[in-house]
Amino acid sequence: MLQIKNLQASVNGEPILKGIDLEVKAGEIHAIMGPNGSGKSTLASVLAGNELYEVTGGEVWFEGKNLLEMPPEIRAREGLFMAFQYPVEIPGVSNINFLKTALAEIREHRGLPPLSAKEFMQRLKEKQELVEFNASLVNRSLNEGFSGGEKKRNEILQLAMLEPKLAILDETDSGLDIDALRIVANGVNKLRSKSNAFIIITHYQRLLQYIIPDYVHVLYDGRIIKSGTKELAYELEEKGYDWIKESLQASLS
Amino acid sequence: MSKSIFNSFYQYLIENYRLPEENQHNDVAWPKALLAHKQKAFEFFKTHGFPSTKQEDWKYTNLAGPLQQVFHIPANDTAADLKAAIASASIKDAHAYHIVLLNGKWQRELSDPLPDGVHFLDGKDALHHYYAEEYFASLADPTGVSLVAMNTAFIPAFNLLHIQKSTDRPLHIMHFYAVNEPAFLPERLLLVAEEGVQTQWIDTFHQLTSAPVFINYVTEQFLKEHVAMDIFLINQLQPSAVVFHHSETYLHSQSTYHHLNFSFPGAGFIRNNINARLQGSSSEANLWGLYLSGDQQLVDNHTIVDHQVPLCNSNEWYKGILQDKSTGVFNGKIFVEKGAQKTNAFQKNNAILLSREATVHAKPQLEIFADDVKCSHGSTVGQMNEDALFYLRTRGLSELKARQLLIEAFAYDILSKVQNDAVAHHVMQLLRQHLHVESALPAGA
């Protein structure tokens, strides 16, 4: 589904990603962990198409297409979704109209007819229940005045509505209490299937107790320095990131 | 540089000034008391001329350019087919009572019959109405604005709207303008709403010809006790229009006033003075404004909220969306006079620049002489929120669609104040029609 080859990117001329290689297949969940400043969120932003980040080298292929050549909206319509670490508040844009517009654009791109008002409402109701999202929030302005947890759940609601092939969750667990964390994780678990894939970016291992990843990668200084299975996450939690840094330095010297 | 402009248009006006009784073309006889206002106003205008940018209230609004040509006082009426124009100017689903004006003159036969208790008067009916002597020129003229004096001096007559009973549907005054050569069109309305009246008034402006016009439109509104009035001012004029509008409102106790001011590209030059005087306790003035500017347009909104007595509230929010090489000017004065305790006065203005060549000058001006008051103001100027734009695009919305949505969201704060769905819808349509998001894209995108 996704092939990242030697991806390099910089912000304001400063290199952040220094050669990322990663392959994600349908049905898989990959966790990307790493200390602050290692480039995790940069990777998510580059994949989503944020123009503040300059890609300086490498390739990214999504379902056989060159992802880096696509503007953000085409990536979304092709089936890529990023749940933001800090979802933007947009006063005056109603949550529900926004979802309707987004879904219509994505369905049109995929050659699907638009949903009728009734079908849309039915689907919305179904997905709202999935993330235990308060119906009154749907009628409000997009994320305006939402609590941190409500914003994150709104991201997962959008994910559920838009049915992407690949979803990137950028620190979705940050700022969540344990109940919200469980709701978000349950939502993701119900949405995962053989035909979709997830990349979960997180600093902590706790989300991975609820969403069991197939692979865990450690990002450090713009590179994936270690990959493994879910046990790697437990090991990291136990030993901390210093353990990885030390073992990296040991292997270099 | 002088504080005034005395140009060839000024010379023309001074040389061609006739008091109505001497004017062969005008058979409307003004009562003596009102003529005195005209005489005085003419002397004031003669002395002060047009304001130059040396005057603080005209610092960013240079009349020298727009008034460099001579706008003639039209000798004859220009014929115009108004039937089609009325149809296209009417607001769908507003079900309004249409009051049709051509170059400021009431077209009675083309206007709707008005409901019981609503009277629109012109000519000698207005001049000799019992309110004319009491109210005419009593509110606008004392402000010492020379363009108001110009209006008082040069109007051939004025219109009077007397509302004695609440209306079930809005009143819609359609101002049509048709001229064959550059014309100076002074226009005046005196409005009196009697105690307890609830009404909505839509005021729209339309040019039927392309020759330049200088429209000088002054209104004086008297809202008596317990009146609730909404005014929707919608300016849809063409680039050849130079517009000066001065609206002066007196609020008696317990009255509530919503003034909504919308303009679009557009009249080349728009200067609005929107003033509300809270003269009766527990009255409330709300000034809401939204302008979308384009091309080389200049849109200047100067407002005054004048708290003269205790226990009054005022809210003001002006928002501007500036395109192309347009310029926006906002000046919001709040006066809280000595003794006007327990005043609540809030003001906000925000502008969004969609083009690097657009300019905005914003100035809140609070002068507070009472100590037990709550007042605040806030002013922002910015570009489109790039984070919000990116967020919407990552959900599949095209950049164009996302920009459009964000601009509509910006406008929504003001549109949501319109307590009339048909008018709100109409204004949103005008916004969509005049907004060209393509040009807002960064170069090369």
Image (spheres, grey):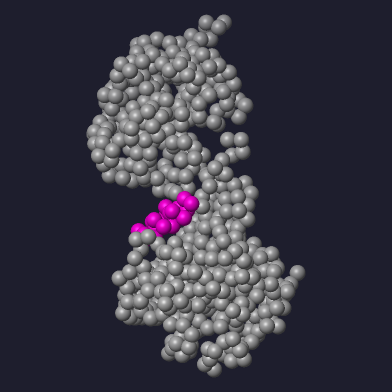
Q: Residue B44 versus residue B325: which sits nearer the camera?
A: B325
Q: Residue B38 versus residue A187: which sits nearer the camera?
A: B38
- Residue B417's x, y, as percent? 39, 59
- Residue A176's x, y, as percent? 34, 32
- Residue A56 higher or lower than B361, as above or below: above
Q: Is residue A148 left or right of residue B266?
A: left
Q: Is residue A137 left or right of residue A61?
A: left
Place residue B183 in its image quadrant.
bottom right
Q: Residue furthest right?
A: B1
Majority secondary structure of magenta residues: helix
Query: Residue B420 lies in magenta, yes or no?
Result: yes
- Residue A242 higher or lower than B64, as above or below: above
Q: Quadrant of the N terminus of chain B?
A: bottom right
Place residue A215 in its image quadrant.
top left
Q: Quadrant of the C terminus of chain B?
A: top right
Residue A64 seen in the figure:
yes
Q: Is residue B249 left or right of residue B154?
A: left
- Residue B390's x, y, as percent? 48, 35
* Point 25% across, 39% down: residue: A118
* Point 45% across, 19% down: residue: A62
- Residue B241 higher or lower than A2, as above or below: below
* Point 47% across, 69% down: residue: B82
Q: Which residues are magenta?
A: B411-433
* Point 61% across, 70% down: residue: B180
Q: Is residue B145 left or right of residue A152?
A: right
